[in-house]
Amino acid sequence: EALGLTAQVVEPISADRVCGYMQQVLEQLAEALEHAPNRPVRNLDILPAAERTYLLEDLNRTAADYP
């Protein structure tokens, strides 16, 4: 058997980045199944730490000085 993934994105995304997402999701799912099987899937931390920082902090740096 094989695992396949098809992604449609507006901007190019590297295969390494997609693999990082997949690895994080699978690790979180395995951990939840072992230690907290009743945890809702929506509560899993699916973003790698660096990606979370990039999306929530780096891209949101909109502070600007105004006269």
Image: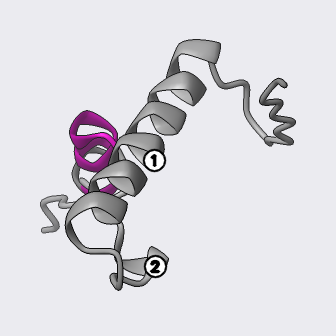
Residue type (three-letter) at the residue carrying disc 1: Val
Q: Is residue 5 above or below residue 26?
A: above
In this rendering, does residue 55 appear at all? Answer: no
Q: Which residue is mark 2?
A: 42
Q: In x, y percent, where is residue 55?
A: 37, 50
- Is residue 1 found left or right of 19 in the rendered image? right
The stretch of residues the image draws in magenta is 48-56
Residue 5: image quadrant is top right
Quarter of the rendering occupied by the N terminus = top right
Q: Is residue 47 above or below residue 64?
A: above
Q: CA distance from mark 2 to mark 1?
A: 11 Å
- Residue 53 located within the stretch drawn in magenta: yes
Q: Main secondary structure of the magenta part?
A: helix
Residue 44: image quadrant is bottom left
Q: Is residue 11 above or below residue 52?
A: above
Q: Which residue is mark 1?
A: 25
Instruction: Give the residue drawn at x 29%, y 49%.
Output: 52
- Is residue 65 found left or right of 13 in the rendered image? left
Q: Is residue 52 above or below residue 33?
A: above
- Is residue 18 found left or right of 2 in the rendered image? left
Q: In x, y percent, where is residue 21?
A: 49, 37
Q: In x, y percent, where is residue 16?
A: 53, 14
Q: How is the image coloured?
A: one colour
Residue type (three-letter) at the residue carrying disc 2: Arg
